[in-house]
Amino acid sequence: MPRLLYITTIELSVRAGLIPFARYFRANGWEVDAMAKNVTVSPDCAAEFDRLWEVDWSRNPAHPRNLLSAPATVARVVQERQYDLVHVHTPVAAFVSRFALRGRPAGASPRVVYTAHGFHFHPGGHPLRNRAFEALERMAGHWTDYLVAINNTDFDSARRLSLLPDNRIRLIPGIGIDRQRFSPQSITETQVRQVRRELKIPDGAAVFTMAAEFIPRKRHRDLLEAFRQLGAVNAILVLPGSGRDLQKMKDLAETLGIAARVRFPGFRKDMPVLTKASIATILCSEQEGLPLAVIESLSLGVPVIGTNIRGTADLLQPGCGIKVPVGSPAHLAEAMLWMMSNPNSVAAMSALARCSSAPYDQNNILAMHRDLYAEALAS
């Protein structure tokens, strides 16, 4: 019975992204464990994994404990459980875990697979910062058996920089989504009406939604400024989520005079319904890997306005949405106004959007991981 350990920095990454993997591989005879900060107090994770392991590290890459205490925890658990394969996700967990396991003899267990959810170096990044993170990835490549890139830009970069030999670099588009849950037919008109009533959205108002953590790189500020530039149109902006900049953005909406037309509903478990209630979703980030929010929107047949960056640009095939430059409220406002003014074109976009999400179906992604793991264990 193969033993597999998933490692991420925080419990949310396990709960939100890796439970389908645990179900799939456990159903196929694997033992599947998970390690993350606070994962041992998650009932959802406890129900889906064989074992959960706690590790004390920080999402801040520079925090001392990331290299002082956390590596010993990783090494101890891996030695104790004798895993056949360790799959690391998220930047801190991925680097620290590979550092902890760096002393393995060539070809020894466990095999280490690393999924890069968007390298910290990217075309829009500062040159010095890019070079520093490239150097770290080159170093960690010596401790890695297989590297998984989730977008074309990172795949090309990994090969160009020779982070690993080409035959050990894979392109797998993300962690997949349940396209049955995120299908237009799964949402009823009654559900849409209910969520509009709950959020006090006037009849006939167009809804634009951006589901994103309130952190600087998501650039909520640009979107709020764009919404102000729209003027007194019949539209509502919905910004679900949480994060350190949430109150700043609420204050900014007040300052811009648009607070009455902006909703901050916090964390939502009904994102498929809220997305389906929208004329379009928006993601105006400056940096992404392969954003699930965009894939989910496309799967629901809701077009996307997204910045022309790595990952998002991969997803927005022609006819599925509108790509805009990073940091341009004027282009965001123009795109929103176009969506409101061209209902027939938006309807055509909806059909294409749904079709374009097919490669990201969870079953496809699970099969690609199955084949990768088989190759890794046979090597």
Image (cartoon, rainbow, N blue to C red):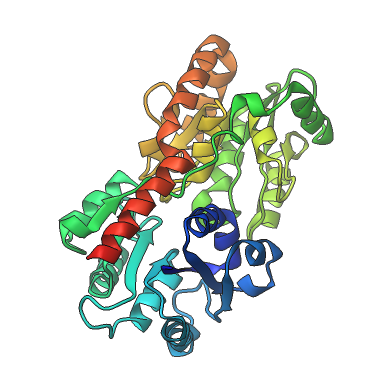
Q: Is residue 220 above or below residue 116?
A: above
Residue 186 x/y as whole percent: 66, 29
Residue closer to the observer: 273 or 178: 178
Quadrant the N terminus occupies: bottom left
Residue 298 x/y as whole percent: 51, 31
Quadrant the C terminus occupies: bottom left
State the image quarter where residue 319 is shown.
top left
Q: How many marks?
A: 0
Determine whether, in the image, residue 144 is placed left or right of residue 56: left
* Residue located 47% across and 63% down the image: 30
Q: Is residue 113 above or below residue 237?
A: below
Determine whether, in the image, residue 353 is placed left or right of residue 142: right
Residue closer to the observer: 204 or 314: 314
Residue 148 x/y as whole percent: 32, 56
* Residue located 35% across and 64% down the image: 114
Q: Is residue 342 above or below residue 355?
A: above
Determine whether, in the image, residue 95 is placed left or right of residue 41: left
